[in-house]
Image (spheres, rainbow, N blue to C red):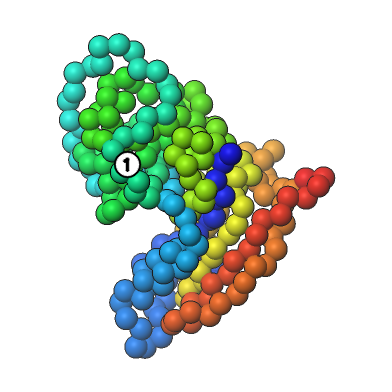
Amino acid sequence: MRPKVICHMIGSIDGRLLSGRWTPLPEGAQPNTILKIYEDAANRLGGQGWIVGRKTMSEMVGAPSPQLHEAPATTLTRSPHVGNRQERTLAVAVDPSGKLHYGVDHIGTDHLVAILGEHVTDEYLGQLRADGVSYLFAGAQGQDLAAAMETLGTTFGIDTILLEGGGTINGAFLKADLIDEISLLVYPGIDGLAGIPSVFEYQGSRHDAHPAAGRSLRLLSVETLAAGIVWLRYAIDRKANG
């Protein structure tokens, strides 16, 4: 059974994600206010890990050079591999083509897990194994997010996970109907420029014009936090005829 997926984000009042562009907080707010409030709220959601896309994860891990390893003696099966987890919470990267290189098995105290397409090479899988990184597969091309979430539940024992990606990966999860709750921190500021990344940005065509079709939002709670940040929580309900 797949885990509950909570999309946990912070954005300006116009839904934009690039915090460096937002108008400033009121006078007296501490520089680390945003991050602290975001992390405190995330801790209250009870997730056993978090998910981001490749671009977001690349900003976190930097660009370590790939380490050369001998090719495995036999072809590796395209089945989940649990690396050096040690019961840690998970830091999950959706990286269908296997472009990320880690060099370690963790970010902070969280264990790294890669979601891949089955077409990645044995050499790349060997590199992940050598680093202690876990991995699992999302179909042949890495697009079957539903299958990946099932594996997180069955193989990794995850009950709840936080989706903290950029707009593209959030949009992909939205289109796949894999988001069960939205946790949105509304920052009291404005970006205002068209084209700036936003909370949901499904990369589809005109026939996919409504990636949230068949769903509605049900308010769970509203809470005012420090510095005028408002925390909104919504359950996503599936309509019977959706």
Quadrant of the rendering where the C terminus is positioned: top right
Going 36% across and 71% down the picture, which residue do you hit? 36
Which image quarter: residue 75?
top left
Q: Residues within 10 Å of mark 1 (few under 14, many from 20)?
A: some
Which image quarter: residue 130?
top left
Towards the viewer: 110 or 16 = 110
Towards the viewer: 164 or 79 = 79
Compared to 113, does 188 lie above or below? Answer: below
Going 37% across and 29% down the picture, which residue do you hit? 81
Q: Where in the figure is residue 115, as x and y percent of width and height?
A: 42, 35
Amino acid carrying mark 1 in the image: Arg
Element assignment for label 1: loop
Compared to 191, does 100 lie above or below? Answer: above
Which residue is at the far top? Answer: 74
Q: Where in the figure is residue 114, as x and y percent of width and height?
A: 38, 37
Left or right, 123 with respect to 189, comes to left
Which residue is at the far right? Answer: 241
Towards the viewer: 232 or 83 = 83
Going 49% across and 31% down the picture, which residue do you hit? 138
Quadrant of the rendering where the N terminus is positioned: top right
Q: Where in the figure is residue 129, as x and y percent of width and height?
A: 27, 29
Q: Where in the figure is residue 17, as x and y percent of width and height?
A: 45, 61
Whether residue 151 is visible to the viewer of this picture, yes or no, is yes
